[in-house]
């Protein structure tokens, strides 16, 4: 199996960067800034970005920085977004069905981990942008990353993933994407 991401068959899922949740997330603003960079690079490369919101009536919507970068947002009640139709959203009519899904989000040990496992069970190859994920407690974040790795899910940083999509400095969008990566984080 090819271990590299296929940019033509990729999608990004941003899990639960909700305004009411983020203040309690350890390094939450940093995780959200990395998620925004991931989304901006993906969109520049024509890769779909989907968001999820856990119980939005209770926890409110995603932060505006995330909302504006998602082409669609799935409201969910299950911790695993696939239980609320995420795989169907990713395979929506009129779009190329992804084989590779990059996931980032909050909380790493609950919704992010369960959604990544759900995508894996749905037959998709899953990568987690570890530096764009967060939890209230760092120990839970580390435990979740260990469990994801044991499950065969690939952990990487945002930049690792983006440069895999690019493959070469001769990519037609290289300069545009590089500018996003070098820009100050918002």
Image (spheres, rainbow, N blue to C red):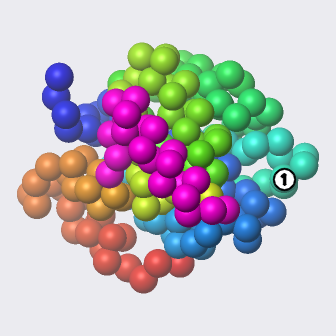
Residue plotted at (45% across, 38% down): 147
| Crowd rating for badge 1 (residues with CA inside 10 Å; few <14, some 14–19, many 20+) | some
Would you say residue 142 sits in the magenta stretch?
A: yes
Left/right of residue 140 with respect to residue 183 in the rendered view: right
Residue plotted at (15% across, 54% down): 171
Query: With respect to residue 10, does 98 lie above or below?
Result: above
Residue plotted at (63% across, 51% down): 107
Query: With respect to residue 68, does 27 lie above or below?
Result: below
The x, y position of residue 178, in whole percent, is 26, 69
Image quadrant where residue 75 sits: top right
The x, y position of residue 62, in whole percent, is 72, 56
The foreground one among 186 and 128 is 128
Could you tell me if residue 49 is visible in this image? Answer: no
- Point out the stretch of residues depicted in magenta: 136-156
Could you tell me if residue 157 is visible in this image? Answer: yes
Q: How many marks?
A: 1
Which residue is tagged 1?
Answer: 59
Element on which disc 1 rests = helix
Residue plotted at (84% across, 53% down): 59
């Amino acid at each position: 199996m090819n271990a590299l991401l296929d940019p033509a068959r990729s999608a990004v899922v941003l899990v639960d960067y909700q305004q009411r949740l983020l203040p309690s997330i350890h390094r939450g603003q940093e995780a959200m800034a990395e998620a925004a960079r991931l989304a901006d690079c993906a969109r520049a490369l024509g890769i779909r970005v989907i968001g999820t919101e856990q119980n939005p009536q209770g926890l409110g919507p995603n932060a505006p920085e995330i909302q504006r970068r998602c082409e669609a947002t799935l409201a969910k009640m299950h911790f695993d977004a696939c239980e609320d139709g995420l795989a169907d959203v990713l395979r929506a009519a009129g779009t190329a069905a992804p084989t590779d899904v990059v996931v980032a989000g909050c909380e790493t040990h609950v919704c992010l981990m369960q959604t990544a496992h759900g995508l894996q069970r749905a037959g998709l190859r899953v990568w987690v942008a570890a530096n764009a994920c967060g939890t209230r407690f760092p120990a839970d974040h580390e435990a979740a990353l260990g469990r994801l790795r044991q499950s065969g899910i690939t952990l990487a940083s945002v930049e690792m993933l983006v440069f895999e999509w690019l493959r070469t400095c001769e990519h037609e969008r290289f300069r545009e994407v590089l500018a996003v990566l070098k820009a100050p984080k918002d």
